[in-house]
Amino acid sequence: MAKIIVFGNEKGGSGKSTTAIHVAIALCYQNKNVGIIDLDIRQKSMSRFLENRSDFCKKQKSDLPNPIYYKIEQSDKDSKTESNSEEEKRFAEALVTLEETCDFLVIDCPGGISNYVKMAHTVADILVTPMNDSLIDFDLLAKIEASTGKVVGPSVYSEMVWECRQLRASAKHPPIDWIILRNRISHVFSKNKYQVGNSLKNLSKRIGFRLSTGFSERVIFKELFLSGLTLLDLEKMVDWQPTLSHISARQEMRMLLAGLNLNSD
């Protein structure tokens, strides 16, 4: 049975696809069979990455490890009931197909909440929510009292995760391991950084997630996308000469994988 890792956040631009891509390729390098479902049907960042990767391998005659990609489409039914039913069938077919051969299944969700997003969160063994280190992003997890900085209630996204947890519990499935990744953390102390960190620690006890460090704002991640490569691929290149930025980014990648603890039972 494949372990299902879902990357989700109601906000776009938080680093979901970038993180999902690097985690998927890292697992491939660990000789794991990895399946991918890209639910961001409009932007298709993960799908485009895999297309770029395929083109790179053909041009360079390179044999880089690749995950198994399952294409899933949005229903075009006019009726919401019929549309949801068709999407549920398509999603179930994708899971059955990939779980037969995969050790891990990586699902990249779009920003916002849709029928596909809800289904993905419900089947998640591990839910990874990248967020930029700002109060704007934190607002999508919980509401804060402006004068005191105290958490006064959950957000729509947190409520959805809670509902998915309830569905899993009613089906007697193991609980979701929810991980919040703090991306783009400033190396300089600031009031914003302190307040976000303190609020996340308090919120983690209330709604049940653990914290991990994600990626800094590094140009290298964006540059590699066009070639369909990750930092782990660069290490296999004979003529690669790493810069300090590469070394720092590689260390971030290793810390991220260690924090996710994906290979634990």
Image: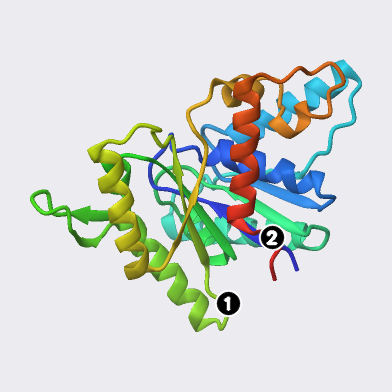
Q: Residue at x 48, y 43 (%)?
A: 110
Which of disc 2 and disc 1 is earlier in sequence? Answer: 2
Residue 117, x across and y down, in percent = 49, 54
Quarter residue 1 falls in: bottom right
Q: Is residue 144 left or right of residue 26?
A: left
**Side of 55 relative to 259 (left or right):** right
Mark 2 packing: few (<14 Cα in 10 Å), some, or many (20+)? some
Q: Is residue 136 visible?
A: no
Q: In which quarter of the image is the C terminus?
A: bottom right
Q: Is residue 194 visible?
A: yes
Q: Mark 1 points at which residue?
A: 174
Q: Residue at x 30, y 57 (%)?
A: 156
Q: Distance between the residues labelled 1 and 2?
A: 17 Å
SS at mark 1 in the image: loop
Q: How many marks?
A: 2
How was the colour assigned to the protein in this rendering? Answer: rainbow
- Residue type pointed to by label 1: Pro
Q: Could you tell me residue 151's position as x and y percent?
A: 21, 59
In front here: 29 or 16?
29
Q: Is residue 76 above or below residue 162?
A: above
Q: Residues within 10 Å of mark 1 (few under 14, many from 20)?
A: few
Q: Within the image, what quadrant is residue 163 found in? A: bottom left
Would you say 54 lies left or right of 261 here? right
Mark 1 or mark 2, whichever is nearer to me: 1
Q: Name the residue under label 2.
A: 95
Pick out the residue farthest to the left. 147
**Amino acid of disc 2:** Leu
The residue at the point 16 percent across, 52 percent down is 149
